[in-house]
Amino acid sequence: MAELLIHTDKIKQNIKSLSAFFAERNVYWSLITKVFSGDKEFLSNLLTDDVIEDIQSIGDSRLTSLKNLKEVNPEIRTIYIKPPAATYAEEVVKYADISLNSSMETILELNKEAIKQDKIHHIIIMIDLGELREGINRTDIMDFYEQVFELSNISVLGIGSNLGCMYGIAPTYDKLLQLALYKELIAEKFNRSVYMISGGSSITLSLLRDGVTPPEINHFRIGEAAFFGTEPLGGSQFLDLNTDTFEFCAHIIELEEKKMIPEGEISEASIGNIADLDEINRNETTYKAILDFGLLDVNHEDLVLKGESEEIKFVGMTSDMTVLDIGDNLNEDGTPRYQVGDIIHFTPNYMAVARLLNSKFIDRKFTS
């Protein structure tokens, strides 16, 4: 069975490096673990006391994941990082110490539930700065806050926004400055302190590194940089973080010399693929390697062959198998390069890891 290798020591080093990075700048941060879908084995291996001691909270976008976080470590402060559905107010208050919100109807339900559970539920109110994803309209901010401040069991921790996730709207100094200005307006009108301004995700890290974020921006929600060592916009390494934190290994289950063009009438395949074979000689042959994973597990576009020959090319996928073209399958000395049972190594990106961890057909292994 194909296997995802998770190098926990390298991820831990990344988290500790980020904690130091934020501490130097007097910034809070939340570690966002949604790529791991609440996997208890991962959470237990990674979220040790020495790793999380300087993290403000651990966040996820799934309530089941937050529940698993609390089961692994009840002392962890959790943050629910998408606006919750009102119908799940009970679970949100139970498993999330903090939640990001943009709906008054939902906040009212959270308040009712917090009263029932005898808790104060903390929220960060999200504002839309142009990404057109979650966030209240900027013209509604004052009326919105006036209503929330009247609620008995809701505590407003701060104000926040999300950029770069849906349309790729880049975070800029001017965008983030808007959050700082809204904080000042809220404090002036209501004489209430809003101490946290959540300025974004890994996509905003380069601005903080370069010293071009407004000083009022004091909270970040970080996932990709911690687990992959990269910045989402360009995919480049951030600081000196480890980028070789995951490896996907698939087995060759068949290896045969076959024609490059299938025989018979070519039509749309059962999973919707149409082969582009116009410029291939019908009599040419090549070695085809079949690997033990498919489209149900991961998309090949999210994988990069690791240390393999440029001759290897992706051919196609079905639900449970992947086909590669490996050329003449010969080393320089004429010996076969691959045989059945050999392993092909890939570097997976963020989306690949998320899908592989959700596949029940892929093994996972935690390594140092």
Image (spheres, rainbow, N blue to C red):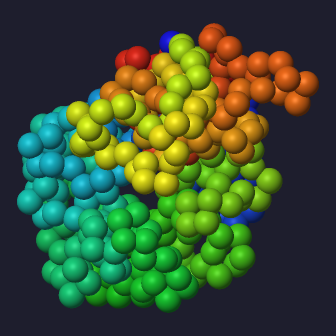
Q: Nearer the viewer, residue 93 or 229?
A: 229
Q: Residue at x 27, y 74 (%)?
A: 132
Q: Is residue 148 left or right of residue 345?
A: left
Residue 25 image position (x, y, % from top left) = 70, 66
Q: Nearer the viewer, residue 173 or 330?
A: 330
Task: Examine the rendered structure and indicate whether residue 25 appears above or below residue 246.
Answer: below
Q: Quadrant of the C terminus?
A: top right
Q: Residue at x 35, y 65 (%)?
A: 166
Q: Quadrant of residue 307?
A: top right
Q: Please indicate, yes or no, whether residue 269 appears anywhere in the rendered image.
A: yes
Task: Examine the rendered structure and indicate whether residue 171 appears above or below residue 341.
Answer: below
Q: Residue at x 34, y 74 (%)?
A: 131
Q: Nearer the viewer, residue 327 or 23?
A: 327
Q: Please indicate, yes or no, whether residue 72 appears anywhere in the rendered image.
A: no
Q: Is residue 123 left or right of residue 243?
A: left
Q: Residue at x 15, y 48 (%)?
A: 85
Task: Examine the rendered structure and indicate whether residue 95 appears above or below residue 249.
Answer: below
Task: Examine the rendered structure and indicate whether residue 192 appears above or below residue 49.
Answer: below
Q: Is residue 119 left or right of residue 104?
A: right
Q: Nearer the viewer, residue 317 or 42?
A: 317
Residue 193 image position (x, y, % from top left) = 40, 72
Q: Residue furthest front?
A: 283
Residue 300 image position (x, y, % from top left) = 48, 41
Q: Is residue 18 left or right of residue 184?
A: right
